Image (cartoon, coloured by chain):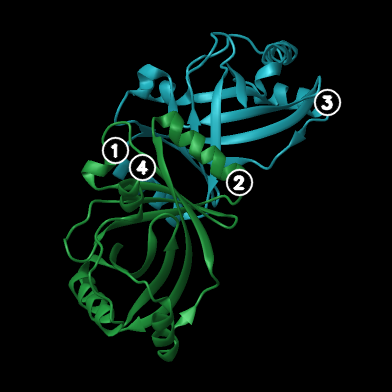
Chain colours: A green, B cyan
Amino acid sequence: MLEVEMKFPAADFGALRRRLDAWGARRDATRQEADHYYNAPDRDFARTDEALRLRRTGPANFVTYKGPKRDAQTKTRTEIEVALAEGDAAAADFGRLLVSLGYRPVAVVRKSRDVYHLERDGFALAVCLDEVEGVGRFAELEILAPEERLAEARTVVQRLAGELGLSGSERRSYLEMLLNSR
Amino acid sequence: MLEVEMKFPAADFGALRRRLDAWGARRDATRQEADHYYNAPDRDFARTDEALRLRRTGPANFVTYKGPKRDAQTKTRTEIEVALAEGDAAAADFGRLLVSLGYRPVAVVRKSRDVYHLERDGFALAVCLDEVEGVGRFAELEILAPEERLAEARTVVQRLAGELGLSGSERRSYLEMLLNSR
């Protein structure tokens, strides 16, 4: 699957929440996410535009690989995510495994995330309202789409952004913004 | 934790089973294991004496890193293992994630494994009777020991081998033996 994603600065979550509620979007419980990013021993992910991340949210742990972005406007990229065993020990062990392989911890992006789910044109969309430590407030729109529906998915995401009054899309990742701010 | 391990050719599982049964060793249900080995993009694990493995046994999936062996007689090495989500999809996704990072599939070692558990001198020991496709029958003795009990653990494993009438320890891994046999 490909991840089609757009991100926008969003100082005013209130207006977005009212719109999403009016559409009947389903809201998950607020999540605290800690994303531990690693860089590779054989190449620099900042240059190759890839990412390797261990996400911790509550007891759950996920490892995620993100491939290079494939177009400029929407952040379309390969995303592969696998759940690990839950808990602190599994996360610590997986971190040690990565370090043993030569991966180096880069930074930890911590955020509070509210996810709203809605459907558009047969796509399941997620709108994430993110408050990112040291970075700011952003709204992220996401679709996971199969290759053959990619163009369509991009159109849907861009139209949704317009309907939510979002503009000035931010192409950098939270990790890049965090590193730039230091 | 460190893994202290010795492996011996064992044509006659019958005699070993009788001895283990007489000691009251607890036997697990027979497992079919498929160990998918990968090599690294930045170094050759065959030279560095490391291993990265995705083990599939029933629905369970594990990723394991093994560090270089630290002594010649017992195969003492760092071992880090993390459980992944269960099932075919998670295993396939994790394999794709490794390939995206630049890891290359080397070979799959398939074996039928009977594990017996026993205690000696406060250590939990495992005796594995392994029938390895394309390689043969082996008995593997294993202790996971903390660094500070390493010397003691080695002595216990060597004594157990003697009591089981095992000799001619095999230092190569199943992967090395499988690749040598090709």
Identified at 24% across, 62% down, the residue is: A75
- Residue B22 numbered mark, or none: 3
Q: Amino acid at mark 4?
A: Leu
Q: Which dot, 1 or 3, sits closer to the camera?
A: 1
Which residue was labeled with disc 4? B98
Along the line of sight, the residue nearer the viewer: B85 or A152: A152
Q: Which dot, 1 or 2, sits closer to the camera?
A: 2
* Mark 3 vs 4: CB contact within 8 A: no
**Distance between the Cα atoms at labels 1 and 4?**
6 Å
Q: Amino acid at mark 3?
A: Ala
Under circle 2, the secondary element is helix
Identified at 47% across, 17% down, the residue is: B172
Along the line of sight, the residue nearer the viewer: B122 or A129: A129
Q: Quadrant of the C terminus of chain B?
A: top left
- Residue B102 numbered mark, or none: 1
Query: First in sequence: mark 3 or mark 4?
Result: 3
Q: Quadrant of residue B150?
A: top right
Identified at 63% across, 9% down, the residue is: B167
Q: Amino acid at mark 2?
A: Asp
**Distance between the Cα atoms at labels 3 and 2?**
40 Å
**Distance between the Cα atoms at labels 1 and 3?**
49 Å
Under circle 3, the secondary element is helix
A44 is higher (above) or lower (below) than A20? above
**Distance between the Cα atoms at labels 1 and 2?**
27 Å
Q: Tell me where residue B152 appears, x and y as whole percent.
A: 72, 13
**Distance between the Cα atoms at labels 3 and 4?**
44 Å
Under circle 4, the secondary element is helix
Which residue was labeled with disc 2? A88
Please tell me how crowded label 2 is: few (under 14), some (14-19), or many (20+) other residues with Cα within 10 Å. Answer: some
Q: Tell me where residue B93 appears, x and y as whole percent.
A: 39, 52
